[in-house]
Image: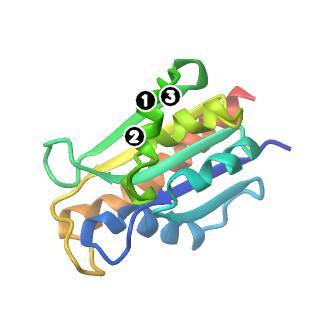
Amino acid sequence: MSRVLIAGIGNRYMGDDGFGPKVIEALMAMNLPEDVEARDVGLCGSTLAPDLGDYELVIFIDAVKKGGKPGTIYRTEIKAEEVKELKPEDAMRFFTFSVHEMGLEELLFIAKKIGTLPPTTIAIGCESLEITLSNALSRAVEAAVPGVVELIMEELQRYRERK
């Protein structure tokens, strides 16, 4: 049976950084197909890399800062063959900071290196307004949660149709 992971990245106690976990919370209240796992992965960094090999499709949900209007949704599809190898000096730089400093790109590099990168990864980001000590999302980011849940359900439908 194929498996899908929907991973919410972020810190639910840092304002809009809690977007990923908030989307996971909404998904867990739904009746997801049995081969789909929704997981709040927090600030897991490289520790998630070995687990990715258990899935055919991984969808990451996170707050982003790209300079757009708060609440704007960005979707990026990444094929395993598009993930480039890290140069040794770059790889060492990622391990000299805490795991919380590691971004999605570095996580994918590591998963590819250890052979656990799934064929397709989708990253869905929501433009954040503020990352500050708070357990509440800003209005614009909170308002984006239902739309992202709907987008994820559409992604799952497309995935099923391709199989």
Q: Which residue is mark 1?
A: 89
Classify the position of the C terminus by image quarter.
top right
Q: Residue at x 44, y 37 (%)?
A: 105
Q: Is residue 126 above or below residue 114?
A: below
Q: Position of residue 90 (x, y in %)?
A: 41, 31
- Type of the residue with mark 1: Glu
Q: Residue at x 22, y 54 (%)?
A: 71
Q: Nearer the viewer, residue 47 or 80?
A: 47
- Type of the residue with mark 3: Ile
Secondary structure beneath disc 2? Answer: helix
Secondary structure beneath disc 1? Answer: helix
Give how far apart the Cα atoms at labels 2 and 3 are.
23 Å
Is 60 positioned to the left or the right of 128 in the image? right
| Circle nearer the viewer, 1 or 3 | 1
Instruction: Look at the numbered discs 1 and 2 and tell me whether their residues touch, using CB distance below 8 Å.
Output: yes
Instruction: Look at the numbered discs 1 and 3 and tell me whether their residues touch, using CB distance below 8 Å.
Output: no
Give how far apart the Cα atoms at labels 1 and 3 are.
24 Å
Q: Nearer the viewer, residue 144 or 12?
A: 12
Q: Which residue is mark 2?
A: 93
Q: Position of residue 130 (x, y in %)?
A: 16, 64
Instruction: Look at the numbered discs 2 and 3 and tell me whether their residues touch, using CB distance below 8 Å.
Output: no
Give how far apart the Cα atoms at labels 1 and 2 are.
6 Å
Q: Position of residue 20 (x, y in %)?
A: 42, 61
- Residue 39 is tagged as none
- Residue 78 is tagged as 3
